[in-house]
Image (cartoon, helix red, strand yellow):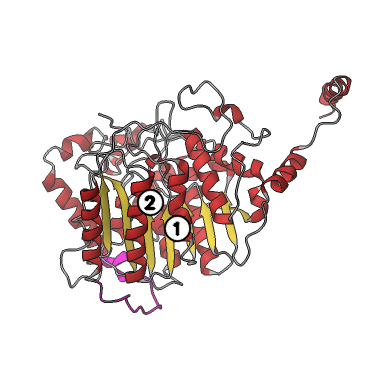
Amino acid sequence: MARFSGIVQSYYQHAQQQGGGPTLTVDEKVRNEIARNGIVRPQGYTVSYHSNSDIEPHHFGGQHPMKPWRLRLTNSLVNSYGMRAAMDDYKSRAATKEEMAEFHREDYLDFLQKVLPDNDSIYDQGSGMQYNIGADCPIFDGLYEYCSLYAGASVDAARKLCNQQSQIAINWSGGLHHAKKSEASGFCYINDIVLGILQLLRHYPRVLYIDIDVHHGDGVEEAFWSTDRVMTLSFHKYDGSFFPATGPVTTTGPPNPLNPGAHHSLNVPLNDGIGDEDYKLLFEEIVGACVKSYRPSVIVLQCGADSLASDRLGMFNLNIRGHGACVEYVKRFHLPLLILGGGGYTPRNVARLWTYETSVCIGAQLNVALPLHTHFLNHLTKESDPKVPFPTLIPPLIPKFANANTPEYLRGLVMSIKEQLRYLKGAPSVQMQHIPPDLMGIREDIDMEIEEKRMESDEGWRREKEKAMGIRGEMYID
């Protein structure tokens, strides 16, 4: 440090000569921002924030839409507004292999742990094809560390809810809802949501999982397909081909009415271009009905940002406040709440959205002018010209698609969901000694059944698998 002292001294003297006086430290600027925005700890409940900066530098590849760096932008904004002062701030640890094995198969975890980008021998054995490694889910340096860190944050957040150390727990690095028991899918390798819910089931009788990513929450739905202790509710685009090409309104759980999971997997398939007003009305009516019928003990909300307008891969027209209205509505039930990230492929808007939704969780009203001491402020640019900085929290997002959701269609969705809820015979009574048995032995049979159906429904499945491309992966754009 000594050899730089001359440079530092010269800079300070230059500032004094310019009449600027001593420069405020970052801490002082953050304290000023806290005062300016009236940020205080919430009254009557605790919010915990779970993050680890070691996740942020991981890189899927230059052309890949998934950018873990979006988390650095998000955390930078949260820090700059001073919102961590209103929350219990935790640096999350990596999930252990044993913790991840509560859902994932050990051979799959072994593969993720050992594989390297230049390890051709593993591909020669066909493991990459077996585990769906390819363009959507590439191998990159630090893959296992990346997976264990975001999974560990969700496990830790769930445990804080179980221990009643927190009433709202936030992990923006989580929400990777496509990963299967022994297969990567849609940029997701480890299903942190399933791992978090398994923790919650040790303490809470019933979990309501809500997914507002533009893509169907298929991995979570499959994991809890045959239990009534978890209800999954996914709002997503569906046309039979948009990734992952699952989640029609008719998919409601196992067809056998004697299976406990029957009518506990609910799907709200939407067409292109839905906007704030329609989405908000639909969300509140359906979620309200589910909470009333199912009476969950805790809610998990996946806040995928790819449902925003202007997203690189998304096809909805939501704005930041419209998306945040879903968080605000769920918060009003005053149930323990696990908030997770998810998709989102325009990093500048992902960061803005999750910063705004953090403010919703703590009950703060933020000034929309971004703090000028925010790191990487030059990356928060205009939608119309990404080269022009635009330091606002709530930019106007440019709709890319006409709204193809008619009022009649939306009313039909509400009626279909409420019809499914009529089959529920009240909230299930639960013995709390164990987590659902279907996640142990029965789960294997479900996995085999799903795999067989997928192979039967697509004659070209094997050929696509050999290319390690999946079926119309998330990177597929017409």
Q: Does the segment drawn in magenta span residue 438?
A: yes
- Please name the residue shown 59% across and 39% down the image: 368
Residue 341 in view here:
no
Residue 372: x, y in percent? 67, 33
Residue 441: which quarter of the image?
bottom left
Mark 1 belongs to which amino acid? Tyr
Query: Main SS type for the magenta part?
Result: loop
Residue 55, x across and y down, in percent: 53, 42
Report, in whole angstroms, how far the alpha carbon at label 2 lies from the one at label 1: 9 Å
Q: Which residue is mark 2?
A: 280
How crowded pointer 2 is (Cα within 10 Å; few <14, some 14-19, many 20+) is rated as some
x, y percent for residue 37: 66, 47
Give whichever of 288, 242 is nearer the camera: 288
Q: In the image, which residues are magenta? A: 424-442
Q: Nearer the viewer, residue 418 or 387?
A: 418
Is-magenta flag for residue 114? no
| Residue type, mark 2 in image | Lys
Say which residue appears at 32% left-offset and 75% top-offset: 427
User: Where is the C terminus found, in terms of image quarters?
Assistant: top left
In the picture provided, is 133 more to the left or to the right than 61?
left
Residue wearing tag 1? 329
Asked if the residues shown at circle 2 and circle 1 are in contact, with their CB atoms under 8 angstroms apart, the answer is yes
Mark before the other along the chain sequence, 2 or 1: 2
Q: Which quarter shows the N terminus?
A: top right
Q: Could you tell whether 176 is left or right of 463 in the image?
A: right
Find numbered disc 1 in the image and state the secondary structure of the residue it sits on. Answer: helix
**Rendered residue at 55%/38% (across/down):** 393
